[in-house]
Amino acid sequence: MDTECASHHEISSSTEKANLVEVESVVQSWMVDYFFATLCRHFKARSGPEFHKALKMFEALVDELESCSHRSGHPSQRTVCCLLARVIDGEQLDVHYDRVTQITPLMSALAIWESLKEVSDTDLHAKIKTLLIVQSVAVCVKKGNSKLAKETLQWLEKETEIPEKLHGKLTAIVSKKDAYDPLLMNLTFNQLLENIDMFLHAFNLESSSVFLLEAASKVVEARNERSEKTLSEQDQSERVPSSPESIITEENEAQVDQLVLNMRPKRKLLSKQTHDPWKPETAKKERATGKRTSVCKLSRRSSSPSELQDCDVSETSKARRKWTVIEDRKLKAGVKKHGEGNWRMILDDFEFGNRTGVNLKDRWRTLKNKGEDF
């Protein structure tokens, strides 16, 4: 804010030294250029409502400038805007820019285009003129208004020079009411718009200034940079050190997607592991797997309920293996991919040691009861 106040003070001081009338004249010139550039942008975007909204402001500003004795208008820019307005409404036969209702927007645009001959390229001017003549008739034919098409052609014969060959083709089109004649297919309304876009590009390079837009863009960029800096400072000041548990949770969430990408290969339905053939003398031996397991030795004579109960107790008394953070991450990744309840599919995709689907189900219920985010 201090910088902006200082800049404002400097501008006020420099304005007092300079001629205020001349300063206002420069500012008004920039404003006219800004609205003209806006109109050109809306025309190229084919946005009729936005174009006409900006046109009202442009005309009001230019009218105010022309009413001042010390200020001359912008005839070229205003003439171009009059052309653009008629062309953008060119296919609307119920829109009138002249007192004579039989004069369509494109007919009116043709007269304006003739006045811009000195500020346009010779070849481009001739091409746009031809397109305006053809489309003035074509729009009436396509709308099914053969009477207006005939009147338009008669008006063109009086008001402008039409090449004899082109005149003959247009006469045949009007008499046959042929909206699909090759001439109309080759010289379309879209071609008219695109050629006027080319004219606007060249005209803006020579006759217009975008200083106001460039200055405003720099102001907006500076404001955005200050806003981002302020938000960054606030975020750093409000940041509270996280507890070890919250850090682990954040790491889990950040690595879930990575775990999905790094899943182990699918298990095959038929294992290739070879097993030793069963022998009677090995029936009661503990398999050497490297893991502590309980062996329940039952004989045909000692199969009492009490002994069976002792066997069950020994099986369930195994020490439970604690779930690790990595296993929790794998479980979250599996649920994210396959959905809750598909424990077998999750076991196929991730390595959980000797855990079963029931183990996964119980651990998932525990995680949800803790209120962790997934």
Image (cartoon, rainbow, N blue to C red):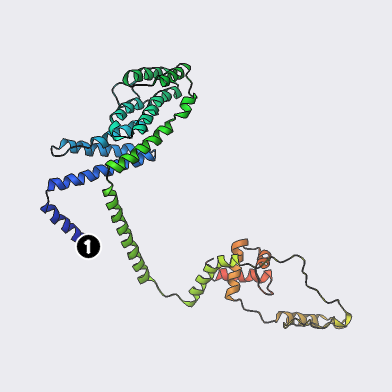
User: Where, quadrant-wise, is the C terminus in this rendering?
Assistant: bottom right
User: Where, quadrant-wise, is the N terminus in this rendering?
Assistant: bottom left
Name the residue type under label 1: Thr
Residue at 67%, 74% in the rendered image:
353
Residue at 67%, 82% in the rendered image:
319
Q: Nearer the viewer, residue 319 or 187?
A: 187
Disc 1: CA contacts within 10 A as few (<14), some (14-19) or many (>=20): few
Q: Horizontal and vertical percent for residue 313?
A: 73, 81
Return the residue at label 1. Answer: 3
Q: Horizontal and vertical percent for residue 113?
A: 31, 30
Residue at 50%, 70% in the rendered image:
250
Q: Horizontal and vertical percent for residue 122?
A: 33, 32
Is 302 placed above or below 163 here? below
Is 299 placed above or below 115 here? below
Q: Quadrant of residue 99?
A: top left
Residue at 73%, 65% in the rendered image:
268
Q: Horizontal and vertical percent for residue 177?
A: 47, 19
In this orientation, does residue 221 appear?
Answer: yes
In the picture provided, is 368 more to the left or to the right than 298? left
Q: Nearer the viewer, residue 252 or 246?
A: 252
Q: Quadrant of residue 304?
A: bottom right
Q: Give the number of marks.
A: 1
In this orientation, does residue 145 appear?
Answer: no
Q: Nearer the viewer, residue 272 or 24?
A: 24
In the picture provided, is 155 more to the left or to the right than 327? left
Is 197 placed above or below 168 here? below
User: SS of the residue at dot 1?
Assistant: helix
